[in-house]
Image (cartoon, helix red, strand yellow):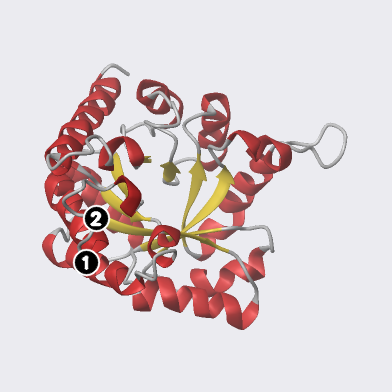
Amino acid sequence: MGFSQRLAESWRTSASLVCVGLDPDPARFPASLRNHADAIEEFCRNIVDATGDLVCAFKPQIAYFAAHSAETALERVCDHIRREHPRAVLILDAKRGDIGDTAEMYAREAFDRYGADAVTVNPWLGTDSLEPFFARRDRGTIVLCRTSNPGSREVQSLRVTDGAEPLFETIARQAADDWSRRADVGLVVGATHPAELRRVREIVGDLPLLVPGVGAQGGDPASVVANGATADGTGLIVNSSRAVIYASSGDDYAAAARAVAMSLRDTLNESVSRR
């Protein structure tokens, strides 16, 4: 089963558009965990187990693991997700972008080492830098398009010539007209840019959109659904990281994460039902 099929099945069986991002920062862990040798793995596993029935996907961010030399912990967390929560799609947030053999190594890292169903990539180097990811026909390639950070407009909204469409629309059109014919492709479009989210949806049809920026960055869930959902009320992987995993700084962090994830799921579903 390919990425798009797995994602569609996860949307159906979970009745959820929520993706929980795993951004483990030991400085924000409960005091009871901070001196544990396996604190990162334990924290993430507990978050995953507390929210696994509420989500369509999990998205570990590789930098949060690599900064603490915790790549082995990431391997184990990914294995735990695949084994204990097989319905959830596993997206490695790596934002890789390089050419030739280096891109091939990044594809092996994401798909072979971590067993991800999909990986985020940067299209700045062009189509040939994406081809090693496209070659994995059973996996997904989620391309940065209109990201949620404030400075993204400096590049992503540039018009290359007078009257031309902004760069993020060019990326969306390339994904719809070319890349999606080669592989299972999605796009990253931030919740903090609702008008741009709507425009991307108009361009790409039913391609899946990974939407960060809900929660700590202030994106509005109802606006995400109104501007980004497909006709059947899916098409979205709505990510929340810090607002979920750091909902409490105490020993009740997993229960608190569950409560926030459930609230987000319900808000998104209510917004779908009102369309």
- Identity of the residue drawn at 37% across and 31% down: 215
Q: Which mark is residue 131?
A: none
Residue projecting furthest to the top: 274
Percent across and percent down for residue 201 are 50, 35
Q: Is residue 1 visible?
A: yes
Query: Is 127 in front, or is 1?
Result: 127
- What's under tag 2, amino acid-wise? Arg
Residue visible at 16% across and 51% down? Answer: 32
Q: Is residue 13 visible?
A: no
Given residues 46 and 230, the one toward you in this image is 46
Question: Nearer the viewer's eye, disc 1 or disc 2?
Answer: 2
Is the C terminus in the top left, top right, bottom left or bottom right quadrant? top left
Which mark is drawn over residue 34? 2
State the image coordinates of residue 160 (x, y, percent, origin top left).
82, 42
> What's the distance in space between the residues labelled 1 and 2, CA to CA?
9 Å
Q: Amino acid at mark 1?
A: Asp
Dividing the picture into quadrants, the one containing residue 216 is top left
**Left or right placement of residue 236 versus residue 193 in this view:** left
Horizontal arrangement in the rendering, residue 101 relative to residue 115 (left or right): right
Q: Where's the N terminus, which quadrant?
A: bottom left
Report the front residue among 161 and 252: 252
Q: Which residue extends farthest right? A: 162
Please give the residue where the numbered disc 1 appears in the rendered image.
38
Sort mark 2 into few (<14), some (14-19) or many (20+) by Cα contacts within 10 Å: some
At horizontal 36% and vertical 26% (from top left) the residue drawn is: 221
Task: Using the image, determine if residue 189 lies above or below residue 24.
Answer: above
